Image: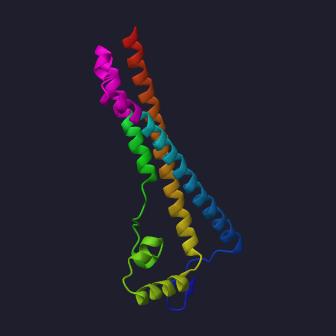
Amino acid sequence: MEAAGNGPSKPSMGDAQKELAEGLLQEAREELGRADNKAATLMSASGVVISVLLAGVIAGKWSPTELGCFQWLWWPGAAAGISGVVSFAAAVWPRVRHKEPKEKLAFFGHVAQYKEIEGLEAALNNRVASQPTERTVDQLHIVSKIARQKYWLIRAGMVLLALALLLCAASVALAEL
């Protein structure tokens, strides 16, 4: 189907598709918030444990060197724990870049790139004239990908913390035998 002088036109979304896309977008945004909360909570709890261990080392009350030959379990566990915290931090790190050009107006960063209001107004007019429902689909795709990436980082962090707990606890338990 050809629009008058504009080349092939995209099929427009019907009301049912638009309603579904808007509902999915709302759910994806809510999931993004839940992922951020989970990652922040896990990062905070991990930070408390690391702080307690560091306080013991700094106060001279305990040192991993006291584990003797079982340090070979402790140090990889400590590295896994730190990697887990870094994974949680990566999950909550703000996403402020987008691959699309600013004229696409896909997120707040594109708006902020305009130095003058006139340029932003022109981009808004072009965006609305081209396909008003396209933004919903773009946002649904972008937000869903970010949520998926955050959950992957959270799962990776949890696996790394579990490995850290296993290795560090094993090193302490074996050193006590």
Q: Position of residue 120 (x, y in %)?
A: 44, 84
Does residue 177 lie above or below 79 as drawn?
above
Q: Quadrant of residue 173?
A: top left
Does residue 150 lie above or below 130 as drawn?
above
Asked if residue 74 lies in the magenta stretch, the reply is yes
Does residue 143 lie above or below 90 as drawn?
below
Q: Position of residue 97 (x, y in %)?
A: 39, 65
Given residues 28 and 8, the one toward you in this image is 28
Given residues 131 and 35, the one toward you in this image is 35
Q: Position of residue 156 (x, y in %)?
A: 45, 40
- In the image, what residue occupies the spot 43% across and 21% down? 169
Which contiguous range is marked in magenta? Answer: 51-80
Horizontal side of 21 relative to 121 (left or right) equals right
Does residue 26 lie above or below 75 as drawn?
below
Instruction: Look at the magenta stretch and give its main secondary structure.
Output: helix
Given residues 120 and 53, the one toward you in this image is 53
